[in-house]
Image (cartoon, helix red, strand yellow):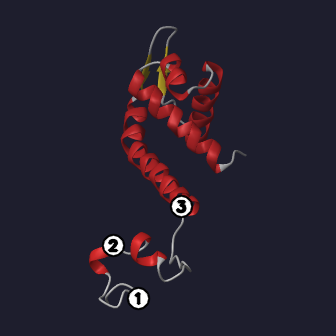
Amino acid sequence: MRDNMSRLEDLEAFIHIAESGSLTRAATRLNRSLQAVSRSLTSLEVDVGLQLVHRTTRHSALSEAGQAFYRRVKPAVLEIREAQLEAAGRRTGPSGILRVGAPMLFGPDFLVPIDRVPSGGVGPEV
């Protein structure tokens, strides 16, 4: 049984094959070997239970089922990848409140814009 990331890679390989019309071009775009892309397509076809791509030595074309599958799968895969990027961005970037301790004379010059410092020079106006 394949894991979910492998299945997502299979779907991405299928999308690239559909868009390029060639397993070789799909492999180049994905920076994967031709054999890996071919295995992904075969695995996906076995999982789905249908031939999605008609292959010849020079060309690959979607079957009727492959065309319908492509139309449904492409937006879903794009959404999953965007969700992964969004989650990764939240995980790696700082978030929340940042509290800085500094001498009183440091704040007005370096932490608070000069036009927001009250006349007492203690901190920003609220």
**Residue closest to the eye, 109 or 74:** 109
**Residue closest to the eye, 125 or 104:** 104
Q: Which residue is mark 1?
A: 122
Query: In the rendered structure, which amino acid carries the disc numbered 2?
Result: Pro
> Does 72 appear above or below 60?
below
Query: What secondary structure is marked by label 1?
Result: loop
Question: Image quadrant of residue 61?
Answer: top left
**Which of the two discs, 3 and 2, labels the residue nearer the N terminus?**
3
**Which of the two discs, 3 and 1, labels the residue nearer the N terminus?**
3
Q: Which residue is mark 3?
A: 93
Numbered label attached to residue 113: 2
Query: Residue shown at 40%/72% (left/top)?
Result: 109
Residue 110 coordinates in the image, percent (x, y) = 43, 69
**Which of the two discs, 1 and 2, labels the residue nearer the N terminus?**
2
Numbered label attached to residue 12: none
Residue 108 coordinates in the image, percent (x, y) = 40, 77
**Residue closest to the eye, 4 or 29:** 29
